């Protein structure tokens, strides 16, 4: 693992230590070479930047983030657009072999440009250790310096794994939010088409431009199945209609209206759900809500 310190200036000159003062110039970039320069064609290494001072902005698809002192960010010299440097800024860059981090290329690409706060968690530990490592010039080409560099690489591999886990959790949350949104639309669609005897998982999936498998997964995450949800809602409407006291309707008519093609199947399903037949429920509900003086009025 090697080290480079960058700060704004108009020319490139070597410097023995990262805390050496930078010359005051009009514009351009000064790279204080504590090791070889970052190569934009270097595909075997990744760079970790530790923010020291000034204005540095990380630009990603999800938005921009202003780095604070001690914050960290993995970057690739071939993707210089990820970082925007302001005036009087300074960063320390550590050059790390990609293979040492123990992740695939695709996984490593996921963490490039992801800001890591240097004041909390593993980010604080990594930032403090790397800053101390950069400040000790006498350790850079010594046995103890080599051991510290290896420790730093192990620490960075842990940091990468934590970033990947956080990204996976964020994606799961996003997917969950999107799933909840489409599930709400599907529930509304089912309510509107409960009377349609042809309502089925296939027709529901087709109406929402999703696969039946994904539809079933949405309901499975909600603790049910598509068919169970449709059946339960149909039974609830049937029970409500059969229990209304202001008019008498036949069981077969109610079953047919709410998508049950077979009265016998409806009767078995109703009994399984409520512990009594539709006719028993109808008699019980209408008698319970009948006026107490109905008999006297009939006489």
Image (cartoon, rainbow, N blue to C red):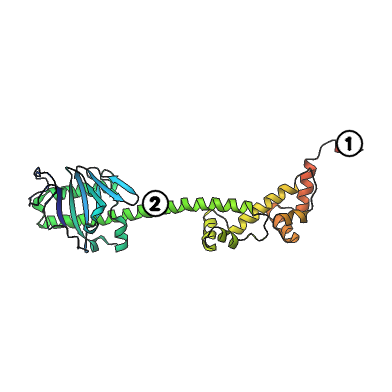
State left or right for residue 81 relative to residue 267: left
Density class for disc 2 (Cα within 10 Å; few <14, some 14-19, many ≥20) is few
Q: Secondary structure at mark 2?
A: helix
Residue for point 59% across, 63% down? 202
From the top left corner, tell me how far across and down residue 222 is, in percent. 54, 53
What is the distance, in whole Å, between disc 1 and disc 2 at their CAs? 68 Å
From the image, tell me which residue sits under label 1: 297
Mark number displayed over residue 250: none
From the top left corner, tell me how far across and down residue 181 is, in percent. 50, 50
From the top left corner, tell me how far across and down residue 241 is, in percent. 73, 48
Residue for point 49% across, 53% down? 179
Density class for disc 1 (Cα within 10 Å; few <14, some 14-19, many ≥20) is few
Which circle's residue, 1 or 2, is located before the other in the chain?
Answer: 2
Of 204 and 138, nearer the camera is 204
From the image, tell me which residue sits under label 2: 170
Of 75 and 104, nearer the camera is 75
From the top left corner, tell me how far across and down residue 84 is, in percent. 23, 48
Rendered-image quadrant of the N terminus: bottom left
State left or right for residue 20 relative to residue 263: left
State left or right for residue 106 relative to residue 43: right
Rendered-image quadrant of the C terminus: top right
Query: Is residue 155 in view?
Result: no
* Residue 41 occupies quadrant: bottom left
In this view, 278 is above or below 288: below
In this view, 115 is above or below 212: above
């Amino acid at each position: 693992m090697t080290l480079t310190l960058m700060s704004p200036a108009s020319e490139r000159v070597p410097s023995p230590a990262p805390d050496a003062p930078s010359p005051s110039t009009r514009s351009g970039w000064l790279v204080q070479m504590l090791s070889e320069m970052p190569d934009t064609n270097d595909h075997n290494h990744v760079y970790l930047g530790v923010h020291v001072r000034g204005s540095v902005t990380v630009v990603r698809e999800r938005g921009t983030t202003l780095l604070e002192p001690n914050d960290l960010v993995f970057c690739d010299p071939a993707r210089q657009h990820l970082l925007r440097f302001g005036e009087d800024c300074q960063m320390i860059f550590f050059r790390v072999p990609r293979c040492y981090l123990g992740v695939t290329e695709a996984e490593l690409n996921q963490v490039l440009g992801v800001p890591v706060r240097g004041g909390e968690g593993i980010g604080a530990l990594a930032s403090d250790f790397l800053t101390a490592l950069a400040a000790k010039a006498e350790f850079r080409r010594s046995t103890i310096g080599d051991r510290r560099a290896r420790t730093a690489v192990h620490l960075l591999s842990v940091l990468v794994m934590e970033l990947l886990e956080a990204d996976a959790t964020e994606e799961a949350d996003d997917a969950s939010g999107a799933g909840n949104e489409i599930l709400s639309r599907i529930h509304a669609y089912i309510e509107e088409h409960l009377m349609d005897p042809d309502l089925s998982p296939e027709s529901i999936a087709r109406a929402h431009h999703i696969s039946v498998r994904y539809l079933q997964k949405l309901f499975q995450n909600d603790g049910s199945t598509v068919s169970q949800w449709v059946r339960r809602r149909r039974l609830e409407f049937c029970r409500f209609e059969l229990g209304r006291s202001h008019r008498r309707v036949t069981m077969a008519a109610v079953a047919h209206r709410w998508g049950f093609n077979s009265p016998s199947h409806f009767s078995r399903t109703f009994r399984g759900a409520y512990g009594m037949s539709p006719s028993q429920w109808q008699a019980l509900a209408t008698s319970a809500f009948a006026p107490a003086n109905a008999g006297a009025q009939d006489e």
